Amino acid sequence: MRLRVDLLPHGNYPDVVLVVDVLRATTTAVTYLERGADALLLTATPEVALGLRGEAAEGKLVLGGERGGLPIPGFDFGNSPVEAAAQNFTGRVVVMNTTNGTGAAHTAAQTGKHVLLSALTNAHAAARRARALASEEIAIVCAGTDARVGLEDVYAAGVLAEYLLAMGEFGIDDGTRIALTVRRNAGNPIEALSSSGHGQHLVSLGLGDDVRYAAQVSTSTVVPVLDAVQETPEALRFVG
């Protein structure tokens, strides 16, 4: 069994893919499902998200997303796990579009047999699910920020890799070695996330609570998994 970490999304994933955008898309996705959402639709563009709401029954779909850390005009919510945790989404489908995470999920879905969304908050549960599904390879894919490597995602990939290596033997690549090194040397989760460039950006926007929320490790057993049922070719449906 192979274990691979891509510091940015590259594609060509033959088996199981764990998509990581810890600040904040995958953390928020986990929270939406924890708060009762029936499913998540990750869209290719904000326009697709707005179009889906226009076609749905009133109140059935809610939109969450951001650009540059700030809510997208016309959306109901931003990309805040703290905001999501304060809501009740029972009976609703959440449509998401974000700067980095939703694009990484679309890249993973092009070839991956099983695509899962992982954050620090569900790291142990996601690692267990990935190990149970994998037959040849587990790829941990870091979303990064604006096509640049993000410390927070590499750190989370290291946490996932540690969990997976504790479960059995893997052949590992250099990306995994890098992630494990970052995990072991970047301090505790809040230090790692707060010191990252994107973490500092979110703090500057007054979103430090989101950084602290995302730094919680294995507080959730919810793992969003790509469903075979697609709403449209431009929207990926994830269920818990």
Image (tube, rainbow, N blue to C red):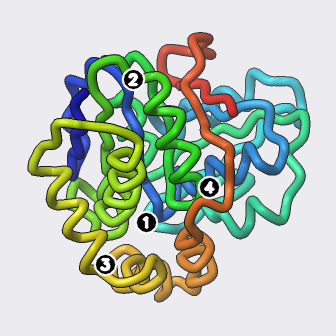
Q: Mark 3 and mark 4 in contact? Answer it, CB < 8 Å.
A: no
Label 3 vs label 2, nearer the camera = 2
- Circle 2 residue: 134
Label 1 vs label 3, nearer the camera = 3
Label 1 vs label 2, nearer the camera = 2
The answer to whether residue 238 is left or right of residue 103 is: right
Q: Mark 1 and mark 2 in contact? Answer it, CB < 8 Å.
A: no
Q: Mark 1 and mark 4 in contact? Answer it, CB < 8 Å.
A: no
Mark 3 to mark 4: distance in Å? 19 Å
Indicate the secondary structure of the residue bearing disc 4: helix
Please state the horizontal and vertical placement of residue 194, each as a whole percent of the image.
42, 84
Q: Type of residue at label 3?
A: Gly
Q: Type of residue at label 2?
A: Ala
Q: Residues within 10 Å of mark 3 (few under 14, many from 20)?
A: some
- Residue that sits furthest to the left in the current view: 174
Please state the horizontal and vertical placement of residue 33, each as a whole percent of the image.
74, 43
Pointer 1 or 3: first along the chain: 1
Q: Residue at x 35, y 17 (%)?
A: 135
In this rendering, does residue 200 appear at all?
no
- Circle 4 residue: 28
The answer to whether residue 60 is left or right of residue 112 is: right
Q: Type of residue at label 4?
A: Thr
Pointer 1 or 2: first along the chain: 1
Q: Nearer the viewer, residue 203 or 70?
A: 203
When asked about the image quadrant of residue 63, the answer is: top right
Pointer 3 or 4: first along the chain: 4
Mark 4 to mark 2: distance in Å? 25 Å
Q: Residues within 10 Å of mark 4 (few under 14, many from 20)?
A: many
- Circle 1 residue: 68
Query: Residue 74, relative to residue 128: is it above or below?
Result: below
